[in-house]
Image: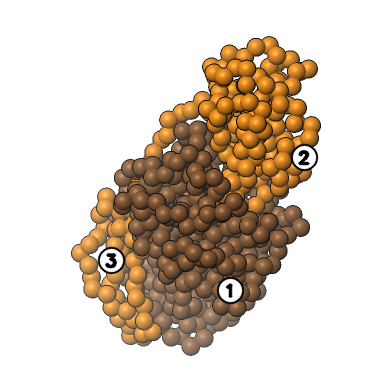
Chain colours: A brown, B orange
Amino acid sequence: MMLITRMLVGGILAGMFTVAQAAGLTIEITKGSQTAVPIAIVPFAQQGSIGNVKLSDVISSDLGGSGFFKTLSEDDMLTKPSEPERVNFKDWQVLGQDYMAIGQVVGNGGSYNIQFHLFNVHNGQLLMGYRLTAGANELRRAAHHISDLIYEKLTGRKGAFNTRIAYVTSVRRGNGKQFMLQVADADGYNPRTIAESPEPIMAPAWSPDGSKIAYVSFHTKRSEIWVQTLATGQRESVSSYPGINGAPAFSPDGSRLAVTLSKDGSPDIYVLNLGSRSLTRLTNSLSIDTEPTWSPDGSSILFTSDQGGKPQLYLMPASGGKASRVTFQGDYNARGRFSADGRSLAMVTGSGGGYKIAVMDMASRTVNVLTEGNLDESPSFAPNGSMVLFAANRGGRSALSVVSTDGAMQQKLAFESGEVREPAWAP
Amino acid sequence: MRFNKTYLALAMTAILVTTGCSSTEEEGLADSTQGTDASTSGYNDGSMSGSQFGSGNGSSFGSGSGANLGPEFSDPNNPLSKQVIYFELDSSQVKQDYVPVVAAHARYLASHPNQHVILSGHADERGSSEYNIALGEQRAKSVERMMRSQGVTAGQLEVVSYGEEKPAVSGHDESAWQQNRRVEVGYQ
């Protein structure tokens, strides 16, 4: 999923890396998986006009970064076939590969015809053959799509390589800072600033269809919740009550936002109907109730509450009512987020002063701490539930990190300048 | 080795293409005429527009622009020159040393009923951002209550919380965190 550091060196890839330079990102694998499946993605043969994207490198990064696969370095390949008839499986068996993929790209004016084949190395069986066309600027997306196809074929699980992330960056500007809400490919490429301000922006939340983002902005010198349509850039303020307007979360049907408001005294959970703008209050207590998030079936709302003294996670019916406590491990649990299938819950967990990312299995309620940092926050699941994206601060530098939900693989996506926070993986 | 080539046109929309792969080896998908028109693709081609919010003066710290404050506000021997109030960890209780500072500002405001301040509450970076917004507000409201009880009218005080979003000091140790757990008294 993420580019590996070897892409930052190597002359022939320098041209491609300049695309990444615009993003100002460096990506590094900080922890590898021991049980990863060996797969070789052979550089695709190219004919005709050549694009600036090397598909096999994008695919290798995607698959290697997922933690499920260990991709073979091009330098170690004995041969580089591009046609099925030319494949000699012994060349790959001797390298210990379980699978290999070959392909061809034919440039044709402004578009490309791509075909690839995926083989089982041990028995030579063809597992998959595909042909696709991609427009001039679509090569990365085509590569991510191929990664999804291979991943799904070999793991039985949907891929998450053709997905997007939102996050907030800030850089120093004059005496203050400039804050930017950005959306990029899940591997950090193609970042676009969708909102910016000299005052903080926080809490980006995707609508279930991925067409809108809700977020909190302080540009009026107080917090307000905005909903912005990505395709048009149009935005509107949906909540500007006195006090806190925070932590927006879309309902699974996209019609409502759960929000935190303190207009009636202390921070409580409310549900805002985006069509009618009617407001329903769900919690009513002197404690801090915040960070609402919907269960994927829409029946419940999970939220953070310090009614027990310190922040813990609670679950209540989506229509309000009695809340039951969910977390009992550690003295601080906050910012819960469900996986799309509702079976897992990611959270920020703290004990002894350090804050890490943990995932709870909702059936057994067992909790696994996935990260080793001290200042980890804002966990967000990949749409296929296999990875968690979060913000980390290591050695004084802020970065986004991805960890596989079994904890076996971790990668860091660091920005060269400024800070990066509050990531949210698109559905 | 015989194999069937299959055709898949990459849809040029922002919606994920789901192929519905089944367990068979070769998938058939109708060749679609939808195509390669880059201008209909989603955010990737720049059709996603940005929104620029207007430039504020970029700072909510200390005295706001336009406040006409006397020399006592810059006299280091005068508590009015201290415009940042500090707190204990996980607490919205003003530190003992700063109780007289709040009192000094409250006295000034009570005798200058046209003077407004914005009390901005802040938290250190640890833990989750939105919970820290709530902690910052608790701190600012704590100062607000103290001032109200000392004769400042409600209309003179506005409360805003920035949580961990606007640290005064960058740093990741107890010294930095202590300086970031604060309320700023911003004269308008």
Crowd tier of the residue under label 2, counting other residues whose Cα lies within 10 Å: few below 14, some 14–19, many 20 or above: few
Please tell me whether mark 2 or mark 3 is closer to you in this view: 2
The amino acid sitting under disc 3 is Ala
- Spatial CA span between label 2 and label 1: 37 Å
The residue wearing badge 3 is: B9
- Which residue does the image show at 49% across and 43% down from the upper left? A263
The answer to whether A403 is drawn above or below residue B153 in the figure is below
Closer-to-camera residue (A6/A418): A418
The residue wearing badge 1 is: A361
| Residue A270 percent across, percent down from the top left | 46, 53
- Which residue does the image show at 70% across and 32% down from the upper left? B85
The amino acid sitting under disc 2 is Ser
- Spatial CA span between label 3 and label 1: 39 Å
Closer-to-camera residue (B180/A64): B180
Crowd tier of the residue under label 3, counting other residues whose Cα lies within 10 Å: few below 14, some 14–19, many 20 or above: some
Closer-to-camera residue (A76/A203): A203
Q: Are marks 3 and 1 on the same chain?
A: no
